[in-house]
């Protein structure tokens, strides 16, 4: 696995993955339409031998085929993220995440790609009911997606599995759990909670928590996701057609997250609380034993160390 295509490589997770792979001697091609990603995220890799950026759209099959040419593996990250965006724009979400994924799978099959790793999401689990609130979610649990975004990610998993069983394309789907780290965009109206909290506090503004702050997530530093993707690239045949949780295996409430960031920044600002948002799941907590067992995955950066690293990166950006 030397030549890797990363779709969505100009985005937050993609650009961190590109950085890691390029530094470790892989040849990397990025396919991105820059809809939520940013050329600036790739600027520092342009001069590296073996790096190539291709502007294009996964909704265009021809473009997907061109992008897969001469590649050994694909890491498919391109998607329209955000639960609220998918509720506002379900057609757009479906076109990018389902049609786009299907195009990439067809292109990968046609170009005889050896490994196809794709990004699913913890959102496929949905809500389970009060008796199961704090139980970690295992891949054996039946998915219960409660937003268009989560439905597109469940669809991606089903397509990926069947492309293995029907056509022998070696697919592996990874359920990422609330990823955070450097280069995560805080400015989009659909930005994630950690970059929003950090940048609001840095500006002296009051961040908003939706709900009473007891909502919890398995916040996962991006280094863990990079490690999971690389392990999937080299996994054996017991991983093909399968789905894996990649996370820290812990559950942090929004209140605890807020106070961890507040403390790291030495801020005294308190959050503002508003009503919960539709489509957001209440608790998210991963059972990571399957990834440990089959992919040899281990957490490389804890939540606490990840927050320290991330806060200091944003502080540098603000100087
Ligand atoms: N960030 C998280 O917490 C998280 C959690 C679970 C799953 N994921 C998944 O991980 C992947 C990467 O997420 P991210 O946080 O880096 O998001 P991001 O928005 O920063 O990156 C997505 C990238 O895909 C590109 N893209 C979107 N539609 C495209 C299209 N039609 N053609 C080509 N490129 C397109 C965007 O321009 C962007 O560069 C996504 O599939 C997302 O659903 C992310």
Image (tube, rainbow, N blue to C red):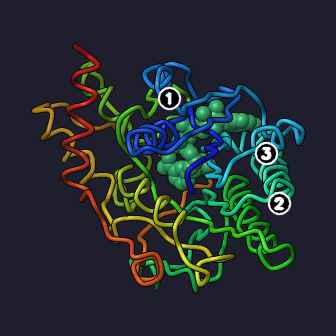
Residue that extends furthest to the top in the rendered view of this protein: 319
Residue that extends furthest to the left in the rendered view of this protein: 266
Q: Are marks 1 and 3 in contact (CB under 8 Å)?
A: no
- In space, the residues marked 2 and 3 are separated at their CA atoms by 27 Å
Q: Are marks 1 and 2 in contact (CB under 8 Å)?
A: no
- In space, the residues marked 1 and 3 are separated at their CA atoms by 39 Å
**In the image, what residue occupies the spot 82% across and 53% down?**
111
Mark number, residue 90: 3
Query: In the rendered image, which residue does mark 2 sit on?
Result: 109
- The answer to whether residue 265 is above or below residue 167 is above
Query: In the rendered image, which residue does mark 1 sit on?
Result: 49
Indicate the position of residue 50 as horizontal and vertical percent values: 54, 33
Instruction: Say whether disc 2 or disc 3 marks the residue closer to the N-terminus.
Output: 3
Secondary structure, mark 3, is helix
- The answer to whether residue 214 is above or below residue 184 is below
- Residue 125, quarter of picture: bottom right
Instruction: Say whether disc 1 or disc 3 marks the residue closer to the N-terminus.
Output: 1
Tell me the crowding category of disc 3: few under 14, some 14 to 19, or many 20 or more residues within 10 angstroms, Cα based: some
Instruction: Say whether disc 1 or disc 2 marks the residue closer to the N-terminus.
Output: 1
- The answer to whether residue 228 is above or below residue 51 is below
Q: Is residue 72 visible?
A: yes
**In the image, what residue occupies the spot 39% across and 46% down?**
24
Indicate the position of residue 245 as horizontal and vertical percent values: 49, 70
- Residue 128, quarter of picture: bottom right
Indicate the position of residue 138 as horizontal and vertical percent values: 50, 81
């Amino acid at each position: 696995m030397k030549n890797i295509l990363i779709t969505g490589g100009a985005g937050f997770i993609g650009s961190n993955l590109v950085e890691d792979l390029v530094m470790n001697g892989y040849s990397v091609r990025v396919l991105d339409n820059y809809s939520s990603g940013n050329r600036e995220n790739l600027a520092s890799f342009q001069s590296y031998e073996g790096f190539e950026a291709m502007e294009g759209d996964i909704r265009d099959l021809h473009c997907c085929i061109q992008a897969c040419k001469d590649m050994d593996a694909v890491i498919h990250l391109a998607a329209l993220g955000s639960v609220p965006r998918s509720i506002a724009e379900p057609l757009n979400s479906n076109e990018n995440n389902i049609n786009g994924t299907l195009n990439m799978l067809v292109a990968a099959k046609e170009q005889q790609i050896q490994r196809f790793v794709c990004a699913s999401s913890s959102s496929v689990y949905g809500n389970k009911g009060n008796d199961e609130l704090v139980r970690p979610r295992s891949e054996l649990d039946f998915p219960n997606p409660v937003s268009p975004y989560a439905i597109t990610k469940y669809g991606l998993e089903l397509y990926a599995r069947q492309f293995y069983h029907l056509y022998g394309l070696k697919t592996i789907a990874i359920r990422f759990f609330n990823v955070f780290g450097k280069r995560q965009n805080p400015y989009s109206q659909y930005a994630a909670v950690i970059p929003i909290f950090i940048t609001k506090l840095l500006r002296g503004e009051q961040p908003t928590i939706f709900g009473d702050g007891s909502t919890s997530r398995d916040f996962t530093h991006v280094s863990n996701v990079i490690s999971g993707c690389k392990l999937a690239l080299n996994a054996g045949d017991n991983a093909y057609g399968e789905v894996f949780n990649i996370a820290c295996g812990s559950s942090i409430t929004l209140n605890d997250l807020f106070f961890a960031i507040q403390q790291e920044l030495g801020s005294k600002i308190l959050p503002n609380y508003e009503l919960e948002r539709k489509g957001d799941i209440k608790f998210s907590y991963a059972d990571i034993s399957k990834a440990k067992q089959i992919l040899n995955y281990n957490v490389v950066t804890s939540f606490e160390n990840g927050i320290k690293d991330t806060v200091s990166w944003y502080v540098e950006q603000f100087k």
